[in-house]
Image (tube, grey):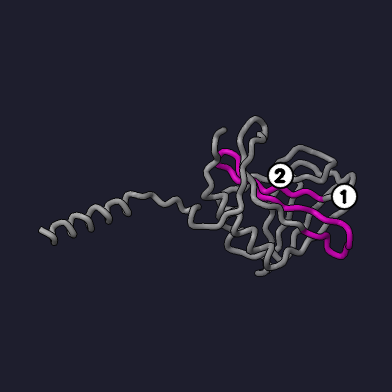
């Protein structure tokens, strides 16, 4: 009788463990955040920004940030210099450590804020996850800018992409 009770307890305990669903994002330490603000009347989530310094310049910076709206992941890039005009379809060139060039095109409207917004496709995400970026070239109407992300920047970019792929946007 005692053996039967133990067997019953083991079966009950093992069923309760297997019944618990583990969300893959819960196993990662993801810094993705979502607040009450809306983007074009839709909820969105974002990863922390990655600050990049303009190559050979001391006081010019840009920020690269990943975000998610609905099920789509976006890359936002903004240079913090006055009157930097960017055309729609203007390329953002990524040079990988392997020497390969990969081009992403701006889908954001023409602006003079120095802002680029790109919707990343699956193949873009795979490419970014599989490679380390050696340099980024950002073309504007008046001047071209170059950035050199370091190892930590590349690692953060991959971690944030992975987190956003798994993150489910919460409706508020």
Residue at position x 23%, y 58% in the image: 10
Count of numbered tags: 2
What residue does disc 1 label? Answer: 81
Give how far across and how far down residue 80 sits, in percent: 84, 50
- Rendered residue at 64%/58% (across/down): 157
Identify the element where label 1 is drawn: loop
Query: Which secondary structure lies at badge 2?
Result: strand
Foreground mark, 2 or 1, reads 1
Decide: few, some or many residues near mark 1? Use Cα within 10 Å; few <14, some 14-19, many ≥20: few
Is 13 displayed left or right of 81 in the figure? left
Q: x, y percentage for residue 137?
A: 77, 57
Upstream in the sequence, badge 2 or badge 1?
A: 1
Residue at left offset 55%, top offset 57%? 29
Q: Are marks 2 and 1 in contact (CB under 8 Å)?
A: no
The magenta stretch spans which residues? 52-79
Q: Residue at x 69, y 54 (%)?
A: 103
Where residue 117 is drawn, which disc sits there?
2
Q: Quadrant of the C terminus?
A: top right
Of residues 8 and 33, the one nearer the viewer is 8
* Observer-nearest of 10 and 157: 10
Residue farthest left in this picture: 1
Residue 52 lies, in percent from the top left, at 77, 59
């Amino acid at each position: 009788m005692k053996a039967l009770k133990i067997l019953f307890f083991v079966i009950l305990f093992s069923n309760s463990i297997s019944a618990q669903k583990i969300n893959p994002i819960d196993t990662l330490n993801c810094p993705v955040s979502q607040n009450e603000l809306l983007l074009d009347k839709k909820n969105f989530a974002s990863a922390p920004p990655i600050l990049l310094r303009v190559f050979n310049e001391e006081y010019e910076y840009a920020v690269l940030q990943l975000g998610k709206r609905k099920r789509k992941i976006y890359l936002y890039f903004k240079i913090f210099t006055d009157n930097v005009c960017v055309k729609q379809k203007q390329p953002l060139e990524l040079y990988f450590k392997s020497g390969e060039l990969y081009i992403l095109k701006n889908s954001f409207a023409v602006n003079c804020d120095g802002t680029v917004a790109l919707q990343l496709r699956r193949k873009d995400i795979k490419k970014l996850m599989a490679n380390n970026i050696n340099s980024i070239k950002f073309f504007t109407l008046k001047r071209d800018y170059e950035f050199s992300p370091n190892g930590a920047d590349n690692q953060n970019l991959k971690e944030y992409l992975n987190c956003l792929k798994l993150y489910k946007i919460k409706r508020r």
